[in-house]
Image (tube, rainbow, N blue to C red):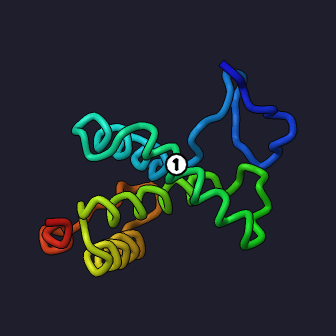
Amino acid sequence: MNRPDLPNLPGLPRDAEGPVFTAPWQSQAFALVLALHERGAFTWPEWAAALTDAIRAAQAAGDPDDGSTYWQHWLDALESLVLAKGLGGAEQLHALEHAWEAAAERTPHGAAIVLTPAERALAR
């Protein structure tokens, strides 16, 4: 298995073991991709292609490509697959994005961000 050249990615957070998540949303996005894949929503080659496309698009737009925006690419790839596979619509994703933003704003620092029942209904 080829390991990335970690010393050349100074923005990539890591510990002695290697790269780490810097925020809970990153691990949740990771888990969501794995869960959707395990349920057959998309194949792993489809995921790899979507992530590659997201990274290339960001690089073309001037992304610093230093690892600091990797999880944003992960979300962009996930969104593109959700839309392409008909798992959700653009309006639904947009509404959920705003619901999470509102939930984050009303949540005290250090507390878990929780959607209200009405906000969770947007995901259906």
Residue occupying image coordinates x 63% and y 52% = 70
Left or right placement of residue 96 versus residue 21 in this view: left
Residue occupying image coordinates x 34% and y 46% = 32
Crowding at mark 1 (Cα within 10 Å: few <14, some 14-19, many 20+): some
Q: Quadrant of residue 121?
A: bottom left
Kind of residue sitting beneath label 1: Ala
Q: Quadrant of residue 57?
A: bottom right
The answer to which of 77 and 46 lies nearer the viewer is 46
Relative vertical location of residue 64 with respect to residue 74 in this rendering, above or below: below
Relative vertical location of residue 79 with respect to residue 1 in this rendering, above or below: below
Relative vertical location of residue 38 with respect to residue 42 in this rendering, above or below: above
Q: Position of residue 86 (x, y in %)?
A: 24, 64
Viewport quadrant of the N terminus: top right
Residue occupying image coordinates x 72% and y 49% = 67
Q: Position of residue 58 (x, y in %)?
A: 67, 65
Which residue is label 1 attached to? 49
Outermost residue toward the top in this view:
1
Q: Position of residue 102 (x, y in %)?
A: 35, 77
Left or right placement of residue 21 versus residue 103 in this view: right
The answer to which of 96 and 40 lies nearer the viewer is 40
Viewport quadrant of the C terminus: bottom left
Q: Position of residue 97 (x, y in %)?
A: 37, 73
Left or right placement of residue 104 versus residue 41 in this view: right
Residue occupying image coordinates x 29% and y 79% = 95
Q: How many marks?
A: 1
Q: Secondary structure at mark 1?
A: helix
